[in-house]
Image (cartoon, helix red, strand yellow):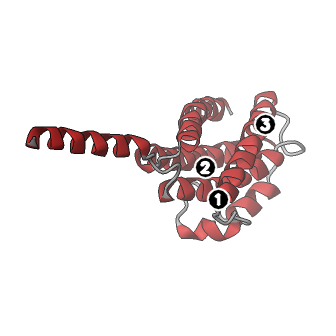
Amino acid sequence: MKLRFLVAALAALTLTACGQQAPAHNQADVDFASGMVPHHRQAVEMADLIPGRSDHPKLLALGERVRKAQQPEIDAMTGWLKRWGAPEPTDHSGHAGHGMAGMMTPQQMAELKAGKGVGFDKAWLRMMIEHHRGALEMSRAELAKGSDADAKKLAQSILDSQQKEIDEMTALLAER
């Protein structure tokens, strides 16, 4: 009799546990999206600086790819934040001084905006490499601590694509 009761109790616990779902998102997911949105916005801003300051075809093409890749990701992450009831970051400038990995300071952005030609190309490549490394750091944290499947998928995509872009930018920097 005791064995049947124990088996029934264990079965009930198992069914209860199976019916419970893990949270769709956690604070690491919110932190990832909240940090990555302004991070991506700055990358788009940096990419927007290339036309008119550089005539290097590979750099122009890279800037266009950055814009095309990151704006849809911004849209997705702001949608997640809204769905999660988290505030959407509105400005990246405040984050630059708070240690967000890879963010350019207002002074660095002003220097970049003032550049032209090969000097601009080199500065842009150095800054975007640093910027992308920050995105890699944030993506690794999401993969380690996040729980939202979509956020983790995006983090892996960012790791893969931005590492390739870092390699490409490092090669471009060497030839400039």
Tally the numbered discs.
3
Q: Where is residue 56 drawn, in percent x and y?
A: 80, 32
Q: Quadrant of residue 21?
A: top left
Task: State the SS at label 2.
Answer: helix
Under mark 1, the amino acid is Met
Distance, label 1 to label 3, CA atoms, is 20 Å
Q: Quadrant of residue 110?
A: bottom right
Farthest front residue in view: 1
Q: Residues within 10 Å of mark 2 (few under 14, many from 20)?
A: many
- Which residue is found at the position 15% from the left and 38% from the top? 4
Number of the label disc, if any, that sits on residue 22: none
| N-terminal-most mark, 1 or 2 | 1
What kind of element bears circle 3? helix
Amino acid type, callout 2: His
Q: Is residue 16 visible?
A: yes
Quarter holding the N terminus?
Answer: top left
* Mark 1 in CB contact with mark 2 (< 8 angstroms): yes
Give SS at disc 1: loop
Disc 1: which residue: 104
Viewer-nearest residue: 105 or 32: 32
- Three-letter amino acid code of the residue under disc 3: Lys
- The numbered disc on residue 131 is 2
Q: Position of residue 125 (x, y in %)?
A: 66, 42
Q: Nearer the viewer, mark 1 or mark 3?
A: 3
Asked if the residue under mark 3 is in contact with the one under mark 1, i.e. CB atoms within 8 Å, the reply is no
Residue that label 3 marks = 68
Using the image as rendered, state which of residue 21 and residue 106 is in the foreground.
21
